[in-house]
Each structure stands twice: as C-alpha cells, then as structure tokens.
Image (cartoon, rainbow, N blue to C red):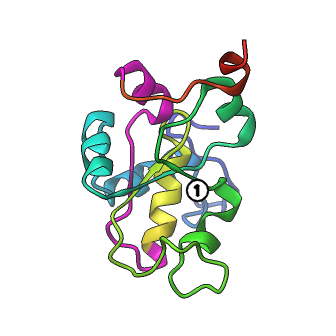
Amino acid sequence: MGTDGYVGEDTGEGRNPQVRGIDAILSEARGRLSRVNPEEAYARQRAGALLVDIRYEALRRRDGTVPGALLVERNELEWRLDPLCAHRLPQAEHHDLDVLVLCNEGYASSLAALSLHELGLRRATDVIGGFQAWAAAGLPVRRPLNEENS
C-alpha cells in the first residue's frame, strides 16, 4: 500500500484510476457532509433531529447508549431509513429528515451518512468522533446494562 492509501492493480502505465483506498473514499464522503461535533448533535437532537446509533450490540452493551437515539445497526440502516422502503421505521416518513448518524469513533458514520444522501436524505450527516467523543464531552449516556445491574 502506498502512503496515500492506494491499493490496486497497476495498469502498466501507473495506478488503476478506478481503484481507490478507504482513506480516499472516507475523505470524499466527509467532503460532501456538513459534519457536526457532539455538542451540536446534542442540540439538534433536542430540537428534533433523529440521532441514529449504528454501533453493533456488543459496543452498546460495553459503553452504553445515548438516551433518545434510534438504534439501527449499520447493516440495516438504508432499509430502515429509506422513506420509500416497505421495511422503513415509522420515523422515516419523508426525505427532509434531519438525521445524525453516530458510530463508535466517527468513521463508519461518515460512509453511512453519505449512503443516506444517495437515498435522497440530503440532510443526513454524522457526528465527529462518534459515541466516544459524545461520552468524552460529558453528554448524556445511558449506562451499559451490566453496570446498571451491579
């Protein structure tokens, strides 16, 4: 892998222009989003934005959850938030939703938010630093189940 994250076939004349590494894809995704910091995400959630936690269950059990966040694992996100899909959640009623995607550290959420853009959810974005930054900022977190029971 090169220092710019490129991985791919060499066409004999240089790099294959159709192959890009994840760093390039992530950078492009973030360039198309108006990402928000945890404090702004909290304010928008309180004003009615849909905060969607896409972390898998093991992370939610380990670290806790954000009160009021919609829990939708990443592999179901598009089906659950597409207003045109028969499997959508009730909250996904129109394309003008203010959607804030939250992952663990703010990487997968950027790609997920861009995917929501492709479904027509143009106001979708993600939270810089993800759940870890949210918790570090002292914003509300519901403790993990194993801590609540001890």
Outermost residue toward the front in this view: 149
The image shows residue 1 at horizontal and vertical percentages of 65, 38
Which residues lie in the magenta part? 118-138
| Picture mark count | 1
Residue that numbered label 1 is attached to: 15
Depth check: give the residue in front, 103 or 48.
48
Up-down relation of residue 31 to residue 150 (above or below): below
Amino acid on which disc 1 is placed: Arg
Residue at 65%, 86% (x, y): give it.
Answer: 86
Depth check: give the residue in front, 82 or 9.
82
Up-down relation of residue 9 to residue 42 (above or below): below
Depth check: give the residue in front, 38 or 32.
38
Residue at 29%, 48% (x, y): give it.
Answer: 46
The image shows residue 38 at horizontal and vertical percentages of 33, 35
Up-down relation of residue 134 to residue 116 (above or below): above
Q: Verify whether residue 38 appears in magenta.
A: no
79 with respect to 138 (left or right): right
Screen quadrant of the C terminus? top right
Residue at 42%, 32% (x, y): give it.
Answer: 129
| Disc 1 secondary structure class | loop
Up-down relation of residue 100 to residue 119 (above or below): above
Q: Specify few, some or many for label 1: CA neighbours under 10 Å numbering under 14, 14-19, or 20 or more.
A: some
Q: Verify whether residue 132 appears in magenta.
A: yes
The image quadrant that residue 88 belongs to is bottom right
Residue at 64%, 74% (x, y): give it.
Answer: 79
62 with respect to 81 (left or right): right
7 with respect to 26 (left or right): right
The image shows residue 25 at horizontal and vertical percentages of 50, 54
The image shows residue 131 at horizontal and vertical percentages of 49, 33
